Image: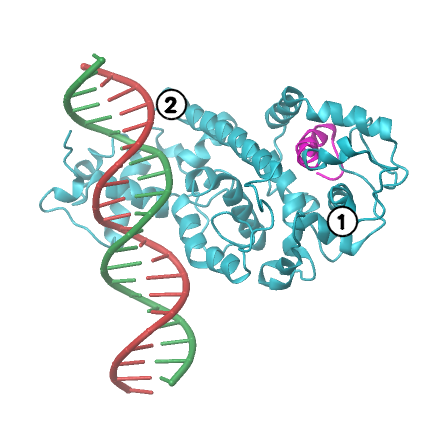
Chain colours: A cyan, B red, C green
Amino acid sequence: MVKSQCFEKVGLKKGPWTPEEDQKLLAYIEEHGHGSWRALPAKAGLQRCGKSCRLRWTNYLRPDIKRGKFNLQEEQSIIQLHALLGNRWSAIATHLPKRTDNEIKNYWNTHLKKRLDKMGIDPVTHKPKADSFGSGSGHSKGSANLSHMAQWESARLEAEARLVRESKLSVPNPPKNLLGSAVSAQVSDKGSAAPTERPRCLDVLKAWQGVVFSMFSVGSSDSLESPTSTLNFSENALAIPLIGVQKNPTTTLAFATNNATCNSGTTASEFDRGNQLECFEKLKEPAQVKRNLDSSMAIHDISPYASDHNEWFVDSSTNENAPIIDGFSEILVCSSLDRNPTCSGENINDNYAGNLEDIYWNSLLNLVDASQTGSSVF
DNA sequence: AACAGAGGCAACCGCACCAAG
DNA sequence: GCTTGGTGCGGTTGCCTCTGT
């Protein structure tokens, strides 16, 4: 199948758009909506191909686009989402209101990628370049679980995308009033369902954020500029939790923060083992974990840009969510029994220890569940 | 002031996917 | 089931601006 590409057509203009062209395109869409992009240029009196018009509209002219510098929160979200989703810029863009996939992609390529690289983090895998996560015999279970989280999130995003398409079909060609509301595929899905709705919080992201991003926050409020935090990786241990350990060796277990059965308030040594096992049984039941995740995703509508957003970012000055991080750290430290005298066989038997990494990741997933109950953490 | 190199970003290109016929 | 048109998406290019010499 050979399609005629728009650039093959003679007489069509390429290159930068002039203000006059912008005006024509804007005026036309404002009046009629875009409808068929292919037919639009002729109707609008533009010597451009439809594709070029669509690109100009979605990346530049759309009224709901925020331009200018990315703030720290946006940067953090991009990094975390990229860790989960890879180069799926449109999916990432759905979680960054008013930012286009193109803009995010450019920002990643020109800023964030280099910055991570400088910090010694592989921008593709989001692991330290001297990989201590999945060392030796391939990836750790943690990586695998993270991968599952990403898969779920991917599935959800795809479902969202389908909804977008469906909603577009049901409301074709929204006219004037489309301006001022979300228009793009990335944004309109939420907008069409409920105009005031913010994009849903990526609950997986929240959990991920709470744990992973602490690595960027240690010792610097502008963590991304701080290469020191990345130097804390040690062999065979997940680095992030270890940072917590270094900060507070007698921390509390809070890895299932809001689950009455599984929760906290006890120190590592006090932690009731029956309680642990009951909790872990729940956590380790994949269907349960997935149900938790699904219901969390279905119920919650907490934007990463909500006013309480900072609650689940690590604030290195106040250490607000340190309990979570430290909780994980405790677990992970205990996963390396030979290195940590506080995790002797008295406290944790071998089988249990063998599953600790599972526990870590399942606990991460459980954090998602915790947010359902109105956690103060999230 | 002039030039060169680097960085940033808008736009292009082509593949992939989907729906309609 | 196949073809075709429309659109979405991610990678890449090339122009413009900034910065250093």
Q: Which residue is drawn at 35% across and 42% down?
A: A58
Q: Nearer the viewer, residue A115 or A148?
A: A148
Quarter of the figure with the N terminus of chain A: top left
Residue A320 numbered tag = 1
Q: Residue at x 62, y 38 (%)?
A: A142
Q: Does the magenta stretch include residue A253?
A: no
Specify start and end residues of the magenta stretch as a single range: A360-378
Q: Give coordinates of residue A122: x percent, y percent.
A: 50, 53
Residue A333 numbered tag = none
Distance between the Cα atoms at labels 2 and 1?
A: 45 Å
- Residue A170 shows in this picture: yes
Q: Does the magenta stretch include residue A365?
A: yes
Where, by quadrant of the figure, is residue A37 drawn?
Answer: top left
Chain identity of mark 2: A
Provide the secondary structure element on which disc 2 rests. loop
Q: Give coordinates of residue A212: x percent, y percent.
A: 63, 46
Residue under circle 2?
A171
Q: Which residue is drawn at 85% across and 49% down?
A: A250
